[in-house]
Image (tube, grey):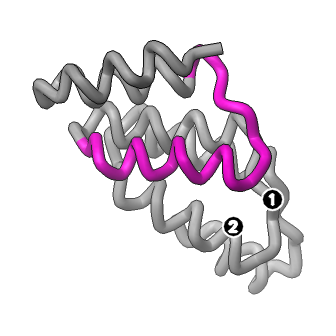
């Protein structure tokens, strides 16, 4: 997850596409903490996340059972004017469902596009 640090050493500017690739790897390995750290690094580097990067981070949290962080990331999408899609909402619903937070899951279902 030190992609931003490495890119500075190599004098390569990271962009949302390259960071999304790393976020997808975090998702596949249930590395939710790394995904969240990378989302923070994106903000500090002034790289604006998009729906794909946010979905990967939400899904990483969902796979690791991090329902609270998944919901926080979902809320952050709206604040950043990124409209959650079916993937975003499904990951949030699944995160809530895995931890028996069915009322929250139902609320998310009601908000799905």
- Residue at the spot 70% in from the left edge and 34% down from the top edge: 52
**Cβ atoms at labels 1 and 2 below 8 Å apart:** yes
Which corner quadrant of the image does residue 45 belong to?
bottom right
Tell me the quadrant of the picture where the C terminus can be found: top right
How many numbered marks, from 0 up? 2
From the top left corner, tell me how far across and down residue 112 is, in percent: 57, 16
Q: Regarding mark 1 in the picture, which secondary structure is present there?
A: loop
Q: Using the image, determine if residue 16 lies above or below residue 8.
A: above
> Mark 2 or mark 1, which is nearer the start of the sequence?
2
Q: Main secondary structure of the magenta part?
A: helix
Q: Using the image, determine if residue 102 lies above or below residue 40.
A: above
From the top left corner, tell me how far across and down residue 6 is, in percent: 67, 76
Q: Using the image, determine if residue 58 lies above or below residue 37.
A: above
From the top left corner, tell me how far across and down residue 3 is, in percent: 64, 67
Side of 91 relative to 75 (left or right): left
Q: Nearer the viewer, residue 84 or 6?
A: 84
Name the residue carrying label 1.
48
- Residue at the spot 73% in from the left edge and 33% down from the top edge: 83
Magenta-drawn segment:
66-87
Name the residue carrying label 2.
42
């Amino acid at each position: 997850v030190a992609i931003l640090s490495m890119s500075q050493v190599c004098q390569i500017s990271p962009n949302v596409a390259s960071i999304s690739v790393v976020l997808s790897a975090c998702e596949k390995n249930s590395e939710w903490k790394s995904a969240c750290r990378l989302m923070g690094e994106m903000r500090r580097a002034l790289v604006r996340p998009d729906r794909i990067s946010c979905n990967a981070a939400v899904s990483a949290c969902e796979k690791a059972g991090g329902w609270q962080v998944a919901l926080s990331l979902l809320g952050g999408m709206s604040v950043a004017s990124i409209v959650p899609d079916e993937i975003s909402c499904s990951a949030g619903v699944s995160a809530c469902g895995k931890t028996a937070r069915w009322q929250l899951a139902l609320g998310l279902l009601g908000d799905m596009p």
